[in-house]
Image (cartoon, helix red, strand yellow):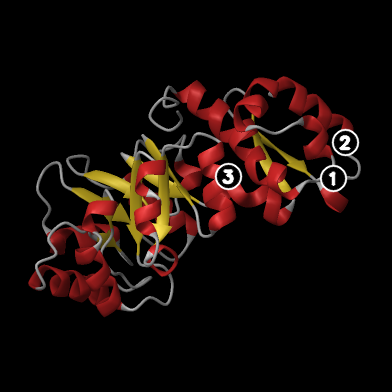
Amino acid sequence: MKIYFNANNKATLEALEGCGVKNVLLSHRYSYANINKFKSRFDSIFIVPGTKGNPEKYRDFLKKKKEYYDYATQFDVFYNMDETLKYLEKEREDGIDWTLPVLQENYLQHLSRLRPKTGDYICIGEVHGKLETEDQIRKLPQNVEYHGLAKGKYIEKRPFKSLDTSGWISAAMSKKTEVWSGNSTFSLFFGEKGRGMKAQVASTLERFSEYLEIVGISSKSVLENDYYSLLKLPIAVLYMPMCKSLGIYDINFK
C-alpha cells in the first residue's frame, strides 16, 4: 500500500524530501504554478483540487500539467454525491478521462451509479459520522481498488491500494505525535504539553535513533522543540517503523 504524504508548502515538501518519502499529495491550489519542480523529487505525485477550488481552473490544470503528476482526483464536493457526479461527467465531456472518481455521501449508492469495472481505481471521500464511515468502508466490494482520501488512520485496518495523510505534521503543529509500538501506538507531547514527558521522549528517541538518523534530526533538536525537527519526527517514530512492520517500507521510502 502506498502512503501519500500531504504537502502544502515549501517547508513540508522539503521535509518530506529530506526524509526520503517517495509519494506526495499536492493540492491544485498550492501546486498549479510550480508542479514541474516536484516531479523529479518524488516517485509518485497525487493531485487533489483542494478546498474552495475552482472547477474550470482545475480542469485546465489537469490537461496542461498531465505529464507532471501520476494520479488526480476528479473535482468533488464534500458530502454531496449528486454534485460530485455532475463534476465527473463534466470532466469526461471535456476529454479528461483519467481522473479518479470520488465517492461522497453514500459509498455504496455512489458506486452503484458509477458502475465501475473490476480493477477500477476509486477514491473514498466523506460520509457524515465516524461509525457510518467505518461501516460503509467494510461493505465496499473488493473487485475495485481504493484510495482513501485523508484516511491515514486506516493504514493498519484496511487494505487500500493507497491512502493519504496530513497527520505527519502533528508534532510541529499541535506538539503531539503518535509513536509506533509493535502493533499499536502511544502518544508523545512536546512543548508545554510535554513538560512531564521529557524522560519518556528521550527514551523513545533513543529507541528510534536509526530512523532519526535517516531523516536527519537529532534527539537534542527534538528536545529543544526545534520546528523542523518536530516536522520530521513523526516520520521517524511512527511512519517508518510502522511501514517496516507492515512490510510496506520500500514502496513508501527510499
Say which of 243 and 151 sits in front.
243
Residue at the right extreme, as displayed: 196
Question: Label 3 belongs to which residue?
Answer: 15
Name the amino acid type tagged 3. Ala
Amino acid type assigned to the residue bearing label 1 in the image: Gly
**Neighbour tally class for label 2: few under 14, some 14-19, many 20 plus, Cα within 10 Å:** some
Residue at the image position 35 percent from the left and 47 percent from the top: 39
SS at circle 3: helix
* Front disc: 3 or 1: 3
Quarter containing the N terminus: top left
Residues at marks 2 and 3, CA–CA distance in whole angstroms = 24 Å
Residue matched to label 2: 198
Residue 219 versus residue 71 in the image, above or below: above
Question: Would residue 12 be found to the left or right of residue 79 on screen?
Answer: right
Residues at badges 2 and 3 in contact (C-beta under 8 Å)?
Answer: no
Label 2 SS:
helix
State which tag comes first along the sequence, 3 or 1: 3
For label 1, the residue is 194
Image location of residue 149, percent across then percent down: 39, 54
Using residue 173 as the reference point, say whether residue 117 is left or right of it. left
Disc 3 versus disc 1: distance between alpha carbons? Answer: 23 Å
